[in-house]
Amino acid sequence: MSLSVPELSVLQDHTGALRPRYSSPLTGDQVHRHTSFHEAGHAVVSMAFGLHVVDTQVYREEQDEDRVFFTGNTQVFVDVVPALRFAVSLAAGDVAEQRHLREQGLLTDEIAGMRAGQDHDQAHAIATLADCGFRIAADHAPRGGMAWAEVVEVAERVVDLLWTRISTVGEALYAHPDGVLTGDEVAALVHLPNPVRGA
């Protein structure tokens, strides 16, 4: 399946719109770490699935004295890839983030409720794959397609298998002074090849 994914800035969603900003009861440092794990989930799973990872980054913006905005972006080169692999690589970010929050004792009902409406990766997968004729729906399995919950189940299994590598990249991204790792740096950290672009 050939996919066309536009190159966008870290502040844009898949439609080109600016990503919304959310308040969180977590500290800025906690948000920074779980955002790093989110992007690490995307990067490691994408690489393991044969996608060339260009870079992965966490963006920090001081909004005022008390608030810091964090978001992230993992840029991959997508040419021909099975639809399910593409969808799972997108779901893996949220799965990794939730696992990290849970392991840190931070995935409270309040946090889970706040995060429920923030899944731009789900919307990205549904819209992009629909353009290619593969149907994913948020709440049910359409004929000839999949429910997003099924994609997430696969992502959970893949993230479990790759968790040590995802954790390594998450911590490295969190600690990086510029908040950016190239795909080749990710590959070196986790001992995976970064597939050749367009191969």
Image: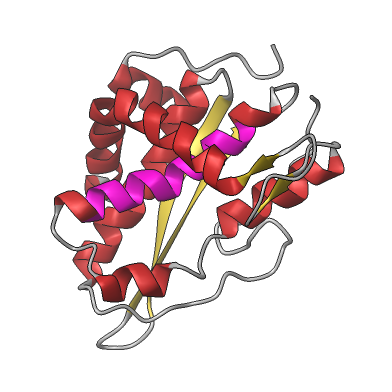
Residue 5: tell me if it is visible. Answer: yes
Q: What stretch is highlighted in magenta?
A: 86-101
In the image, residue 188 lies at what x, y percent? 33, 18
Residue located farthest toward the bottom when viewing the structure as drawn: 65
Q: Does the magenta stretch include residue 97?
A: yes
Query: Dividing the picture into quarters, in which one does residue 199 lie?
Result: top right
Q: How is the image coloured?
A: secondary structure
Q: Residue at x 53, y 60 (%)?
A: 119
Q: Residue at x 63, y 57 (%)?
A: 139
Q: Residue at x 63, y 60 (%)?
A: 13
Query: Dividing the picture into quarters, in which one does residue 62 lie?
Result: bottom left
In the image, residue 177 lies at what x, y percent? 27, 50
Residue 7: tell me if it is visible. Answer: no
Position of 76 relative to 72 (above/below): above
Q: Residue at x 51, y 29 (%)?
A: 46
Is 11 on the left-hand or right-hand side of 45?
right
